[in-house]
Image (cartoon, coloured by chain):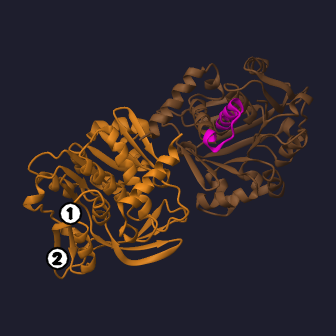
Chain colours: A brown, B orange
Amino acid sequence: MSLVAVGTVAFDNIETPFGNAHRVVGGACTYISLAASYFVKPVRIVSVIGDDFPEEMLEYMKQRGVDLDGLQIREGEKSFFWAGKYHRDLNTRDTLDTQLNVLATFNPILPKHYRDAQYVMLGNLTPQVQLQVLKQLKHRPKLVVMDTMNFWMDTALADLMKVLKKVDVLTINDEEARQLSGEHSLVKAAHVIHKMGPKFLIIKKGEHGALLFHRGEIFFAPALPLAEVIDPTGAGDTFAGGFIGWLAKTDDISFKNMKRAIVYGSAMASFCVEKFSIERLRGLTPAMIEKRVQQFAALVHF
Amino acid sequence: MSLVAVGTVAFDNIETPFGNAHRVVGGACTYISLAASYFVKPVRIVSVIGDDFPEEMLEYMKQRGVDLDGLQIREGEKSFFWAGKYHRDLNTRDTLDTQLNVLATFNPILPKHYRDAQYVMLGNLTPQVQLQVLKQLKHRPKLVVMDTMNFWMDTALADLMKVLKKVDVLTINDEEARQLSGEHSLVKAAHVIHKMGPKFLIIKKGEHGALLFHRGEIFFAPALPLAEVIDPTGAGDTFAGGFIGWLAKTDDISFKNMKRAIVYGSAMASFCVEKFSIERLRGLTPAMIEKRVQQFAALVHF
């Protein structure tokens, strides 16, 4: 089924205890679209870059079935840039630099053939931009998934609440769920957040896995214990891409199938963190992904 | 099968963000024995108390099939006392007071009918006492499970390493696994710790569940997401009691059955945290425990 994803396509500088990566390809929409492309084609992206973004990367995305018609390329301008440094535990990080560049004036425009999308992934961006994307759709999609972060809760809560009313699935981390709901217990937080709009809530806990809440039902998927995590950047976006990619492929948004979607998302995220940038998302095969899903089954089956 | 458990039987003062409990019954061996008693009888305990411990509690333990022949009662002395305060997230706590009292001179003596135990649970205590217990056994038990903590790694590492050589299963938390192994990755930590003796390693992550490592195989059990956690005190000991209780009941120490044992341990721990002290461990029924195990299955099955 048709899938539209909005988010950043960008450069990152990344410092981890295990090494550094300088001006590597990053951005929520990059990770989302590459992960989703292993399940469904085309993945229609809405984003903006400068003329500094590597042509090779755009070619690779096209090869993987990513539709770039909604990607604005601004001559003479620079792509969004983020620099961050991870702490020893890799669960927390400091932002060292953020250069909005082209993102400062981003006005998302959906090409005509995007506007009947059935599946929409709103990557982490200002809620205003997320709203503008939804407004251009001809009809309500079958499923809208939204990612956001504490920064928008602090600075744009009113707009964020408007978007929340229009989405089916919200993905945030545990601290953000607590902040948004005012509840410490994640079970109680889910009740509060359901009332804000999203019927489904996914709480991402990084190395501690992810929880799916829906009408009092709960599903939990662990993160795969890995001997080496090289770079957690993009893991959440890769998870979201795998999640919505699986749902769009199967066109089944039942709670039961969402469980499988979470496992596919977790499997994609487990690849993502094994190398810097999007490197590990290149050249995966369906068999490699299936094998990892089987590892998840073995991990929790009793 | 015969089960012997060593550990503290004590009083606790507990402060949580949700309330306080003053001089309530606590101690690793209390939690272990009550949890295990839902699976196997008798549970033979080795511990020491003063003459201040409530007779009613000892009567209740007897009723539940706990053999108190190895419990030393010292006239005119006081039981071990611990006071702690939990932080808002309930995952971390500060010790406010520790009064060793009878524990300062504890010399564990196993009654004769304890000495052919097949299953031995070494609750968190000084490694010296754990060693003394093992030395009094007539033959090597079928399974020795050991709990310990960072305090002994800091103050009695040489003795701790001696005990480790004699145990089959070690249960510690994630930070302790990192400290003991010197490895940040839990997968790598498990490899290092296996070489110290324990063929099985259980890493307890509190609200984030528990991992079982054995020869490159990994099993993960989440903690049950609860609307309200009242008091985490004793959850790890209750987990250990449910774990070894299930193994002693089924007399099957295969990796497959250890997975089930971990789920039963997690189920018992999920009850424990719902009330202060051991209150929630009174009056459970096999049906209540089975129902909770089914909730665990539903939580992770996909």
Within-10-Å neighbours for mark 2: few <14, some 14–19, many 20+: some
Could you say whether the residue bearing mark 1 is in a helix, strand or loop? strand
Q: Which residue is mark 1?
A: B45
Q: Position of residue A62 (x, y in %)?
A: 77, 19
Q: Position of residue B115 (x, y in %)?
A: 10, 55
Q: Residue at x 32, y 38 (%)?
A: B255
Q: Residue at x 90, y 43 (%)?
A: A135
Which corner quadrant holds the C terminus of chain A? top left
Quarter of the figure with residue B237: bottom left
Does A282 lie within the magenta span? no
Q: Residue furthest front?
A: B287
Three-letter amino acid code at disc 1? Ile
Three-letter amino acid code at disc 2? Arg
In front of the other: A140 or A268: A140
In front of the other: A210 or A2: A2
Task: Determine if residue B32 is in view.
Answer: yes
Q: Position of residue B158 (x, y in %)?
A: 24, 48
Q: Position of residue A274 (x, y in %)?
A: 56, 29
Q: Chain of mark 1?
A: B
Q: Which residue is mark 2?
A: B74
